[in-house]
Each structure stands twice: as C-alpha cells, then as structure tokens.
Image (cartoon, rainbow, N blue to C red):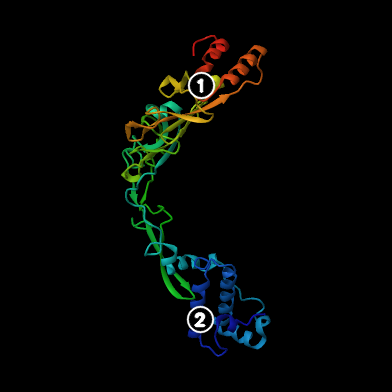
Amino acid sequence: MADFYQILGVSRDADADTLKRAYRKLARQYHPDVNKEPGAEDKFKEIGKAYEALADPETRARYDQFGEAGIGGAAGMPDMGDMGGFADLFETFFNGFGGQNPQGGRTQRRGPQQGDDLRYDLNVDFKDAIFGQQKEITIPHLETCEVCRGTGAKPGTGPKTCSTCGGSGQVRRATRTPFGNFTQVAECPSCNGTGQIISDPCTSCGGNGVKQVRKKLRINIPAGVDTGTKLRVSGEGNVGLKGGPPGDLYVFIKVKKDSKLKRDGVTIFSEIYVSYLQAILGDTVNITTVDGDVNLKIPSGTQPNTTLSLENKGVPRLGNPVARGNHEVLVKVKLPTRITDSERELLEGLASQYSDKNINSSSGLFSKLFGKES
C-alpha cells in the first residue's frame, strides 16, 4: 500500500500546519475541475484519503503504529455532498479556472434579462433565391403576457419580496473545510435568484410573465441569397423576462435545386447537346435561363465540351442586384450510333471533298440530311 506521508510529500514528523499546506497544494494541483490529465481524479482522491487519516491525531497514531490496517479502512475521500459544499468551495477557490463570478455564486437574475434569439430554417425556390421575394412565415415565440403585463402576478396583486434572501436573490452559508471556514454565496432556493415571490400567479401565463404565441411575419428575401445565407430580423426573438429587450430572429436560407440549372456563387451552369453537324456548321438553339428561354448561337466548328458564355444572365450579387454573373453553357456533341445507307453515302462523299480550305462544302449535305438550309 502507498505510504500516506509519501503521497503528501512530507516527513513522518510533520506537524499539522505542514500537513495542511502540503494537502492544499496538492489538492489544487490535482483537483478534477482544474487538472484534466488522465489519473488526476484518482490522485486527488488518494491525496484526500491520506490527509484525512493524518489530520486527525488519533487516526494518525494508529496509522503510525499499524499502517493502513490500523485505521480499519476508515480513511477515505469524503463524499462531495457530505462536506457542506466542498465541490462548490473549489469552484470559488479556483475562480480563475472555472469562470464563476467573484462571489463564487451564480450570476444574479433579478433585473431585466435579454430575450433568447430564435432560428428559422426557410426553403426557397431556385429562381426566388436569385431574384428575391417576400415570403410570409409563422413563428412561435415568447411575448409579454398581456394580462399581467409581464409581472407574472394575478391582476390586482404583485410580487412580494422574498423573505428567505430579503430580496437580494442570494443566500450565504458558512462552510467548514480542510482549508478553514469559508462563507459561500449561492442562489436563493426560494425565489431562484429573483428576489421576489409570486404568491398569486397570473392564470394566463402561469406566473412566468411571458407566454408563447404564433406570429406571422413577412420576410424580405434579397436577390442573390444562397444556401447558408443568414437573415437577421431584429426584435422578433423571444421577449426578455422582467421587461428585458427581445432577442432576434435568424432566418437560415436553404435553396432548392433546379433540374436544368446549377449554381456556383453568381454563376449559372447548364448543358446542351447538339448534333455533330450543328457543331460543324453552326446553328442557333433555344436554351433555358433564369430569365426564361433565349436563343444561343452555336458557332461553326464548335468543339465538344466547349463552354459558351451568356453575359449578365447569372445571379445578382447579394447587396448589388444590378451586377450579375454569367450563364455558362457546356456544349456536348451527340454522335449518331446508326446511319442509313444514303447517309453513309453522303458522308463518304463529304469526307472525300473535305479540306481545310473548303469547309463549307458540307452545306449541301446538311440540306439533304435535315431538309433545311445551312
């Protein structure tokens, strides 16, 4: 078994003050709220067990004579709940680590409190996201109770000062610990830190002073929003308690996909298929854009996977709807898998006549194959 004196790092003739100083130093070092390393909690319990055995003169005398067996296993780390707030004491003692308030208690909630912000996820059609729209939504949020006007008390009555804490919202209690006597400040259990007691609560809001209602709002969706865009609607979150200001509503946009068009930032992308003769000779085709159907000119000699641009047919820039991106069209050439004998004859004739200087010799073939002028 480990030697209790070695655990505390003191000699066997150490006096009570030396034991206490050693214990306090090691307890601060290995307390689980401070030290997150593996094994720190076990070390902390071991330190507490050793100190409890050696701090009491009678227990220490039995330990010195018979070792740990002489104390019959009586020594052990005290239960946190049996030490009169020992865990709370450490939260106060290690204020710089735990982030508690200077008094060691919870922050008071007596005054007006800021209302909570709310989130609403809104699905928007592809084109509505590009050009903007107004949309009506319904949100559930907390509003001040109109019956009690936010007091939480039945009309004609009012809150009373809490007799437990005298209206301060806090209570103090003395705690005896191995470090000495400490005075702790804690939230009043009778009024939950409010400093007031409502003996006759409002029947409309149940004494809360607020109640949940469903409210309709018209949301202005600006042109150019995209998935992930966050719109802030000031003052439409939950109302604050005790007359505190309301929070805000944040609308998160999710844009629905389009079957023909894709978007990347302010650029629109789409694909079209043309025949090999249209690619060779050129043509004008009808394509779909966010502005509707438009004619796109396919230049003669267009190569497969060529990208053609339609300027200012893309997405307006968010905050500057006059400036728009482009629409990029990927041209894919579709080759026939079968041809008739007559088509083969014409193509073979074309192949024999083709030259870099006489590319237009295919115009007659185009007319014969498709029945129109090239």
Left of 341 or right of it: where is 189? left
Answer few, some or many: residues within 10 Å of disc 1's Cα (few below 14, many 20 plus, some between 14 and 19). some
Q: Position of residue 128 (x, y in %)?
A: 41, 27
Residue underneath mark 2: 22
> Mark 1 falls on what kind of element?
helix
Q: Which mark is residue 62?
A: none
User: Which one is nearer the viewer's eye here, 293 or 139?
Assistant: 293
Residue 208 horizontal/vertical position (percent): 40, 42
Q: Is residue 137 visible?
A: no
Labels 2 and 1: the sequence-earlier one:
2
Disc ID at residue 359: 1
Q: Measured along the vertical axis of the image, is residue 270 above or below residue 171? A: above
Q: Which image quadrant: the N terminus?
A: bottom right
Question: Residue drawn at (37%, 64%), measured in percent from left and top?
Answer: 103
Amino acid, disc 2? Ala
Q: Residue furthest top?
A: 371
Residue 290 at least partly seen? yes
Task: Report the amino acid beneath label 1.
Answer: Ile
Q: Position of residue 98 (x, y in %)?
A: 44, 63
- Choose between 365 and 46: the one closer to the eye: 365
Name the side, left or right, on which 173 lies relative to 340. Answer: left
Above or below, 345 relative to 118:
above
Give how far apart the Cα atoms at labels 2 and 1 are. Answer: 98 Å
Foreground: disc 2 or disc 1: 1
Q: Report which quarter residue 3 is drawn in.
A: bottom right
Residue 347 sits in quarter: top right
- How far across and how far down the image is residue 316, in percent? 36, 31
Q: Residue at x 60, y 21 (%)?
A: 351
Contact check, label 2 and label 1, Cβ < 8 Å: no
